[in-house]
Image (cartoon, rainbow, N blue to C red):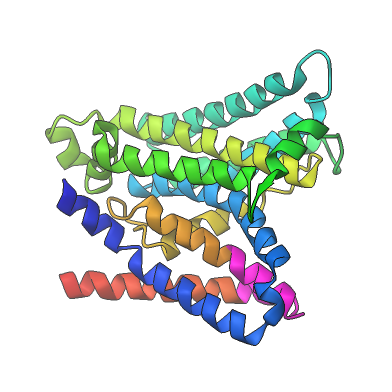
Amino acid sequence: MKGSVNKHVRQAVPAYVILAAILVAVSIVSPSFRKVGNIRNVIAQCAVLAIVAIAQTNVLLIGGIDMSVSSVISFSTIAVAMFSQSSGLSLLGSIALALAAGAATGLINGIGVVHLKIPAMIITISTQALLKGICLILMPSSGGKVNAEFAAFLKLRFGVINVSAMIALILYALFFVLYHDTRYGRRMYAVGNGEACAAQSGVPVGRTIICTYVVSGVLAAIAGVVLSARIATGNALVGDSYAMNSVAAAVVGGVSMNGGLGSVAGALAGAIIMSLINNVINNMDISPYYQYITKGLVLVLSLLIFQLKRRKRA
């Protein structure tokens, strides 16, 4: 098993090389980047995307994709903003509602893929649109108010790292162990490497796929709860960018879109790279529209490197 772990983790090496190159280059070009306040800001911004990147890594490893994470994030901010201050539902109830919505969305996605044989892209875009409509009905414009004590807790800093970032790091540690040291993790990789072969080996393919989508939905909901503390309000559109950014973070981190190869170790590097792009462009007073071009180029470069590595192995 150790050799298998090394193979998956090695996929992350190019991402860390790119990350190191970006950090060195930006530190030289933009002295303001090195300021402690800016580093704190980057880490705080990265926490949400880092958590969603785990969710996307899960489904990519089984050969799927989850575009519904964006609407789950938005719904979670609305749930927390609408109900965390009320005496009826309360903070814990609003978080539970967000997690339940994420799990339900994942369950629908998983059932659609397994039992209805709907392509993952189609079913997850459908649930994304459905949940987005619900979000817009509940909160057509930004509103509500997140519990102040809860928001302050997630923003609490220990050095340059806040509680939100700590939650993300704990989740990365948990899922690294889950992928590489549990039966469920081995089943995920088996399904991603071929459902037919996995089924012949005794892997409950359908159950593994459904479970993976449910976990993805719950992780997206956690990301939304964390984001709600940062923006202190609910917003039906705030999660829109996270679907593609999470795919990009995972792929930049060496996770194969064909399934069965990669690790959260790479997804973390990918999430940091994607967050750095936003921060660097803002720091250098470049038009924010260039974020899309830069992210696209980084993603294309990563896919090119991955394909070249595949050809070399073949």
Magenta segment range? 275-293
Of the 4 image quadrants, the one containing the N terminus is top left
Residue 199: horizontal and vertical position, in percent? 18, 34
Residue 13: horizontal and vertical position, in percent? 34, 67
The quarter of the picture where residue 163 lies is: top right
| Vertical order, 116 against 51 (above or below) | above
Q: Among all residues in the image, which is located at the extreme front?
A: 159
Residue 104: horizontal and vertical position, in percent? 54, 26
Q: Is residue 58 left or right of residue 205?
A: right
Q: Among all residues in the image, which is located at the extreme left?
A: 201
| Vertical order, 19 against 80 (above or below) | below
Of the 4 image quadrants, the one containing the C terminus is bottom left
Q: Is residue 264 magenta?
A: no
Q: Residue at x 63, y 22 (%)?
A: 96
Marks counted in the figure total 0
Q: Among all residues in the image, which is located at the extreme bottom?
A: 29
Residue 157: horizontal and vertical position, in percent? 68, 47
Please say whether residue 67 is visible from this viewpoint: no
Q: Nearer the viewer, residue 261 or 67?
A: 261
Q: Is residue 112 left or right of residue 191?
A: right
The quarter of the picture where residue 261 lies is: bottom left
Q: Main secondary structure of the magenta part?
A: helix
Q: Is residue 283 magenta?
A: yes
Q: Which of 276 and 190 is in front in this view?
A: 276
